[in-house]
Amino acid sequence: MTAPGPARRDTSPNILSAVRKLLPVLLWGAVILWCFLHRDEITAERIAALASGNRLAAAVLLLGLFALKSVTVVIYVGLLYMASGLLFPLPVAIAVNLAGSAVMVSLPFLMGRRLGAGAVSRMAEEHPKLALLRDAPRQNALFFSFFVRIVGCLPGDLVSMYLGACGLPYGKYLAGSLLGLLSAVLSFAVMGKNIYDVTSPAFLIAAGVEVGLMVLSLLLYRHWRRNRTS
């Protein structure tokens, strides 16, 4: 009588678990690839036309695009802010933009939090600019989160992920990030509201404010980088 061989291990649960983990990644990858291939067609007007008709559906669609923006650089966030201005009354557009910004900065932050502190050094090695954030855990979390958004010269999704991995308190990080993005939220919403009259005082003032802040952010970034690397 022969001895029974080792029992065969049922691999079905492992396969199903792997499929469940890979499927969202594949779906996101397909969406990102589509956006990349059609990046020249992604404009504020096209986004607004796609979302027009039902304000609730439009808001949900925009929030989904903000979520997509958090994992890809294909979509310029200014287009989403402007699309809100095209679709909604200004107070509603600002509220939608703030909600979308919260989604946009939260998803990569929470991903970084899940990766943990062990990912900090690896991320800094892969993206040397992130080394500028190495003292983040010792800083005032609210002000530091506000400052890096105002500077705005580092990749936003990587910054969020890095700060999450560093263990910054989420509440202070979110509040500081939204304060840092507030000027863009307001100015782009106003530009979107007046996009069909680019010579109007409202559009010109909003555009001037945004250009001025871009110049200021570049100067702040250069000063900050010089102090950090000296």
Image (cartoon, helix red, strand yellow):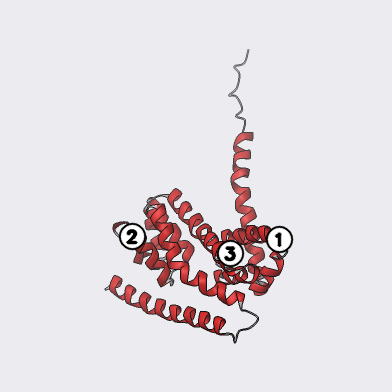
User: What amino acid does circle 3 point to?
Assistant: Val
**Residue shown at 65%/71% (left/top)?**
42
Q: Callout 2, which amino acid?
A: Ala
**Residue 43 visible within the image:** no
Q: Secondary structure at mark 2?
A: helix
The residue beneath circle 2 is: 136
Which callout, 2 or 3, points at the residue further toward the start of the chain?
3
Pick whichever, 64 or 230, lies toward us: 64
- The x, y position of residue 71, in whole percent, is 54, 60
Q: Residue at x 65, y 68 (%)?
A: 87
Report the mark closest to the observer, 2 or 3: 3
The outermost residue toward the top is 1
Label 2 to label 3: alpha-carbon separation: 34 Å
**Residue drawn at (64%, 54%) of the image:** 27
- SS label for mark 3: helix
Q: Amino acid at mark 1?
A: Asn
The mark that comes first in sequence, 3 or 1, is 1
Q: Which mark is residue 6?
A: none
Label at residue 54: 1
Locate the C terminus and report the quarter of the image it occupies.
Answer: bottom left
Q: CA distance from mark 3 to mark 1?
A: 14 Å
Residue at numbered disc 3: 92
